[in-house]
Image (cartoon, grey):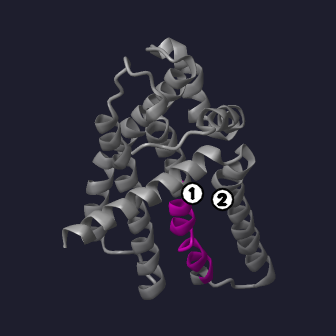
Amino acid sequence: MLFTQLLAVMLKNETKIKMIDRFLKAKHWQLFSLMFGIPIIFQIVMMGTMFWNINSETNPDPTEMFNMFKFFPIIMILYMGVFFSWFWSIAIGLQNKVPENVTMKTKKFKIFFFIPLVYILCISLFIVGIFSGIMQNGTESSGGLVGVMVGIILPLHLLSMFGMFYSMYFVAKTFKTVELQKEVSFGDFAGEFFMLWFYFIGIWILQPKINKMSAKQKPDL
């Protein structure tokens, strides 16, 4: 029994290491395509299809348009999965290259890292619930359900914003600490912080450096 549990833990850790290693060694264009290119293409296709249906039919069926929106949460979850996995890989995967005299608060990072994930999950379920109610009943979802969901989402939204900013702060700090091999202040990694914020630009600058940092080095969990 103990051997089985140890084996399961080892396999789980090995899977995490492989995932982190892939993100650290991924090319900038690969990450850009997954995080920015595919969602943009999906939106273009979705909007094009909607306008085509409107122009081609005298009385377009609204349920057909709402039916397309049910795919939006799936795309959003996939996009955020790649985005947050990239953040996690930098923040955790590069910890074994942080100087020994520098202490990084990884536990605090992990707590704030998962808050936006919970928020996004709630948003996705909220969207699915709204459009499912419209498609099945032809009417809007009940006010009680909407009220409950809004009551959950609003506080999570504020926590999520803080969690996102702290995650970017920690990832940028980890990156700069590994790059300079010393304790850094926000002034040292402010540029990296904003490049992570505007990732569609920053990824072209940061990822090649991350590739070099991760060369011949396995993430240590």
Can you identify the residue that label 2 sits on?
Answer: 39
Amino acid on which the number 2 mark rests in the picture = Pro
Query: Magenta region, mostly helix, strand or loop?
Result: helix
Whether residue 116 sits left or right of residue 61 in the image: it is: left
Q: Residues within 10 Å of mark 2 (few under 14, many from 20)?
A: some
The image's mark for residue 79 is 1
Identify the mark at residue 215; answer none if there is no mark.
Answer: none
* Residue occupying image coordinates x 57% and y 57%: 79
Badge 1 amino acid = Tyr
Q: Is residue 147 above or below residue 62?
A: above
Q: Is residue 26 magenta?
A: no
Tag nearer the camera, 2 or 1: 1
Answer left or right for 111 relative to 123: left
Q: Position of residue 27 (x, y in %)?
A: 71, 46
Residue 74 on the magenta segment: yes
Q: Name the image quarter holding the N terminus.
A: bottom left
- Viewer-proximal residue, 153 or 212? 212
Q: Earlier in the sequence, mark 2 or mark 1?
A: 2
Magenta-colored span: 64-80
User: Observer-nearest residue: 151 or 202?
Assistant: 202
- Horizontal and vertical percent for residue 161? 40, 39
Camera sees residue 122: no
Q: For the residue labelled by badge 2, is the local secondary structure a helix, a strand or a loop?
A: helix
Q: Are marks 2 and 1 in contact (CB under 8 Å)?
A: yes
Residue at figure coordinates x 36%, y 75% from the top left: 141
Q: Is residue 164 visible?
A: yes
Toward which corner of the image does residue 163 lie, by quadrant? Answer: top left
Q: Residue furthest front?
A: 3
Residue 168 drawn at (x, y percent)? 48, 33
| CA neighbours of label 1 inside 10 A, class few (<14), some (14 to 19), many (20+) | some
> In this view, which residue lies farthest toward the left?
1
